[in-house]
Amino acid sequence: MKLAHCILLIAAALVLSSCKIRIVVPEGGSVTTQSGAYSCASGKTCNIDVVDFYFDQKFVARPASGYKFKFWKKADRRFCGQDTKPCRVTTVGTGVNEDLAKVMMSFFESNEVFYLQPVFERVSENALTVAGSWSGAAADSSGPGRMNWTLTQTGSLISGTMTATDGHVRLGIRGTVSGTISGSTVSFTFAIPPGGFQDSRYANCSARLSGTATVSGPSLIGNYSGTNSCTGPVYNGTLDLRRQ
């Protein structure tokens, strides 16, 4: 069917009936038109009855803070599927998309509701990246020392290795570090297995220490505490690391 013929049929159908467009908005944003004539809030379903020959609106998906607009959902009887641009729905002939005209005619013939549905995606809050090497001063109830982290990061999760030197007894320590990131805060846990203390006197000792740190630029400063299976509680732990 030629485009001009489609447009004429749409206009004729509108004399006898109205087109219903149902906007389904999930959490994460809203839908408005560029003209300001229509809007639909997050979590709402809104119906629009098209009752004239000159309906011509561009629908815009507006993501809320912490979200981004991915595309219009593609499914049966849905406009602009997979498109990432504002969705134009029109009964006006000039510049009308032929596929849209066919969809509109299908609607009038079947008397079914057609939909417009945005897809919003939560944006990761963890813009902070701590992957890499960190080194600096550390101290706790066992004495002062030095500490090194080598980290990998997947989203908000971190993992890697930790090495330290107890300056009081010049004891080398090897273990793992794991944790999560929220904003600029890193929540971490050190796990030092048997054999992690590089001294035969402590060969069977292990430790588990947990804490939080704040990342600001090249600095990671925090506190920790925990338990050593041989010496008991570890407390008053502090660390002041710099990105290498």
Image: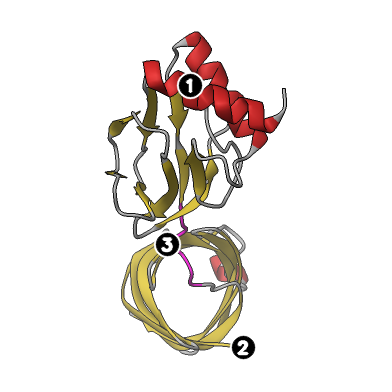
The answer, for residue 98, to whether it is visible in the render is: yes
SS assignment at label 3: loop
Vertical placement of 151 versus 156: above or below? below
Q: In the rendered image, which residue does mark 3 sit on? A: 125
Q: Which residue is mark 2?
A: 244
| Mark number, residue 12 | 1
- The answer to which of 145 and 106 lies nearer the viewer is 106
Between the C-alphas of marks 3 and 1, the distance is 51 Å
Check disc 2: other Cα within 10 Å, few if <14, some if 14-19, many if 20+.
few
Depth check, mark 2 against mark 1: the one in front is: 1
Q: Is residue 158 or residue 106 the one in the foreground? A: 106
Quadrant of res 106: top right
Tell me the element at label 1: helix
Segment colored magenta: 122-128
Locate residue 12, reporting x and y percent: 48, 21
Q: Residue at x 37, y 28 (%)?
A: 22
Residue type, mark 2 in image: Gln
Name the residue located 46 percent from the left edge and 64 percent from the top edge.
Answer: 126
State which quarter of the image contains the N terminus: top right
- Kind of residue at disc 3: Glu
Residue 193 sits inside the magenta stretch: no
- State how far apart marks 2 and 3 are (Cα): 24 Å
Task: State the residue in front, 40 or 13.
Answer: 13
Residue 10 vertical position relative to residue 204 in the rendered view, above or below? above
| 54 horizontally vs 78: left or right | left
